[in-house]
Image (cartoon, rainbow, N blue to C red):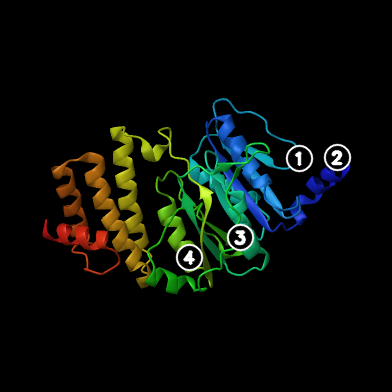
Amino acid sequence: MAFRSLIRTFAPVMTPLISFIITYHNEPETFLRACVESILALRLSPEDAEIIVVDDGSENPFTMDDGRWTMYRQEQAGLSVARNTGISHAHGRYIQFVDADDCLVPAAYEAIVGQLREEAADVILFRMTTKPPLRSPLGGVPQTTAQSTPPKDEQGGEYFLLHHNLRAAACAYAFRRDILGDLRFQPGLLHEDELFTPQLFLRAESICELDIAAYFYRQHPGTITHSAAQEQVQKRLNDIHFVINKLRGLNEPILERRTRQLAVDYLQKTWTLTRSFQELRRRIGELRTEGILPLPLRRYSLRYLFIASIANLL
């Protein structure tokens, strides 16, 4: 206990390998415990791993503190502010975001840890999975078959944005903390990752991608992105529209591919979430007035070609 207390005393001047920032708001305690346990299952020493839990104004907060993680509580301000709070307390060379209702897949994430130890790149990308991992017989920590996966070719952030379709989820990569600069998540915004991730990748001199599912994304009706309430649907659509114009306002030609694909995502979500041809026509008209439409027909994906072709005609 004395040694553990000493670590906590000097934590601000230590530099762990990675800071795990867990954002929590009213999720079931079992989810949060599984999340924390999936991180503790990694072969990382207490000096290598810093676990930060940010409780964003939960109605029934509870204490999970045995010295291996730190919990910060704040008035409810939303996911963006909770992540920013975590960033402000992080000391690791790298940062990994984890939502409290998700968890890492420990045996698979070990490949990520290996890349971080080598400081191979500014950003380490990996895949997410919605398939529940196998459960360990030693306490229920999610696991998968251990594997060694060589990284794909390392690329600069600008090259990556120009030549790849971006998966913007902020939990789908670990990144070097010192490339952040003053970049933070936009408060009050849904789909905040869509604004944060392209700007972060612009700052990365090197991006490495691993073809490995190292993060379990738990889909359940309690999440905001699965809400069918009309108010939430309209906010989701309005926020995507906001992100599109915010990225365009940066005047970065490198981001054109991303903003075009976001416009396609925006129109597809408008239809799937509202099933209103009138609403679709209204939002298409707004994009056309703003100069976003017509979209150039590029072979980013078949979905992009299909939706862009239809939107240009309407």
Find disc 3 in the rendering and name its residue: 111
Viewed as shown, does residue 117 lie left or right of 28?
right
Label disc, if present, on residue 67 of the rendered structure: 1
Q: Earlier in the sequence, mark 3 or mark 2?
A: 2
Q: Mark 3 or mark 4, which is nearer to you?
A: 3
- In the image shown, does 202 or 34 lie closer to the viewer? 34
Label disc, if present, on residue 268 of the rendered structure: none
- Secondary structure of residue under mark 1: loop
Quadrant placement of the C terminus: bottom left
Q: Residues within 10 Å of mark 1 (few under 14, many from 20)?
A: few
**How far apart are the two marked residues, 1 and 3, measured between alpha carbons?**
26 Å
Determine whether label 4 and label 2 are within 8 Å by CB.
no
Q: State the image coordinates of residue 30 (x, y, percent, origin top left).
A: 58, 31
**How far apart are the two marked residues, 1 and 4, measured between alpha carbons?**
34 Å
Determine whether label 2 and label 1 are within 8 Å by CB.
yes
Q: State the image coordinates of residue 280 (x, y, percent, origin top left).
A: 18, 47
Q: Is residue 249 above or below residue 169?
A: below
**How far apart are the two marked residues, 3 and 2, measured between alpha carbons?**
31 Å
Q: Residue at x 41, y 68 (%)?
A: 161
Find disc 4 in the rendering and name its residue: 201
Q: Residue at x 57, y 65 (%)?
A: 179
- Secondary structure of residue under mark 4: helix
- Secondary structure of residue under mark 2: loop
Q: Earlier in the sequence, mark 2 or mark 1?
A: 2
Q: State the image coordinates of residue 132 (x, y, percent, origin top left).
A: 50, 42
Three-letter residue code for mark 4: Phe
Three-letter residue code for mark 2: Met
